[in-house]
């Protein structure tokens, strides 16, 4: 099983600032990496797949990069609605696995 | 509009069984693999199981292998998770999700709102 490790666990950011979230895979997943956003009491929402392709309706301030074992999600200028928990997920091998999440909170 | 609606969550005793259903609409259901993902209270996301578009192949996380069965009825646009020998560790919100098709696929592009399974005596 591929283990996904996200850092940091919590990120404190002021509105308008840039946020950078990291995700590391225990072995290469090529570019088969997705990012999700989850707000309290809601289902997760797909943000990016293929490491860098935005899902339908996702604003351009969300971007992703990386391949192999190291990935980054960047939110260029945090809006109030972006404070949430973010998860990465590898879809290169079964079983599918998620990282433990990064909570982005208001500083 | 893609919609996924889970049902079947309930309070069940340890050792009991439960069947979850997910009704899909707004897309050609028979073209898509589908997954179940769960989230224990206050915890992160855990992928549980997936089934291919035809239903011919299924996949399971170790946590459910041997106890859970996934199936689908493409004529009803519905898929299912049969859970047996439930323990307290299975207590979670269970989400159904559609697997994406682009590239390697199996990212989860649409999600239901979840159904709560509580295992307790």
Image (cartoon, rainbow, N blue to C red):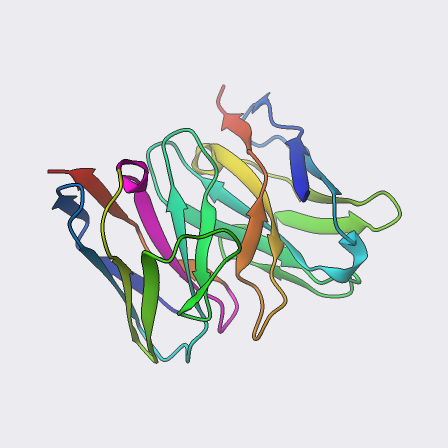
Task: Locate residue A39, reporting x and y percent.
Answer: 37, 36
Task: Locate residue A26, reporting x and y percent.
Answer: 31, 73
Report the residue at 49% width, 33% height from top: B93
* Position of residue B73 in the picture relative to residue A32 (left or right): right
> Where, quadrant-wise, is the C terminus of chain A in this rendering?
top left
Report the residue at 55% width, 34% height from top: B114
Task: Spot the residue most to the right.
Answer: B75
- Is A92 one of the magenta-colored residues? yes
Per the rendered image, the range of residues in magenta is A80-95
* Position of residue B34 in the picture relative to residue A64 (left or right): right
**B11 shown above or below B76:** above
Report the residue at 49% width, 68% height from top: A91
Task: Locate residue B39, reporting x and y percent.
Answer: 44, 40
Report the residue at 67% width, 30% height from top: B7
**B72 shown above or below A74:** above
Task: Locate residue A9, reporting x and y percent.
Answer: 19, 49
* Position of residue A49 in the picture relative to residue A81 (left or right): right
Image quadrant in which you'd find residue B94: top right
Viewer-closest of A87 and B91: A87
Residue B14 visible, this orientation: no
């Amino acid at each position: 099983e591929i283990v996904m490790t996200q850092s940091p666990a919590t990120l404190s950011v002021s509105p308008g600032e840039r946020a950078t979230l990291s995700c590391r895979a225990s072995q290469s997943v090529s570019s088969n990496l997705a990012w999700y956003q989850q707000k309290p009491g809601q289902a997760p929402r797909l943000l990016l797949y293929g490491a860098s392709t935005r899902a339908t309706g996702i604003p351009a301030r969300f971007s992703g990069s990386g391949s192999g074992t190291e990935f980054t999600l960047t939110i260029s200028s945090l809006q109030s609605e972006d404070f949430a928990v973010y998860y990465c997920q590898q879809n290169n091998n079964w079983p599918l696995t998620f990282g433990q999440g990064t909570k982005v909170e208001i500083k | 509009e893609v919609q996924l609606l889970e049902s079947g969550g309930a309070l069940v005793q340890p050792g009991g069984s439960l069947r979850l259903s997910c009704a899909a609409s707004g897309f050609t259901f028979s073209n898509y693999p589908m997954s179940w993902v769960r989230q224990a209270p206050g915890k992160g996301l855990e992928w549980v199981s997936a089934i291919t578009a035809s239903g011919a192949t299924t996949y399971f996380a170790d946590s459910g292998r041997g106890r859970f069965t996934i199936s689908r009825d493409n004529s009803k646009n519905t898929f299912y998770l049969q859970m047996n020998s439930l323990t307290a560790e299975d207590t979670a919100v269970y989400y159904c999700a559609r697997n994406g098709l682009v590239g390697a696929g199996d990212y989860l592009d649409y999600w239901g709102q979840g159904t709560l399974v509580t295992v307790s005596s």
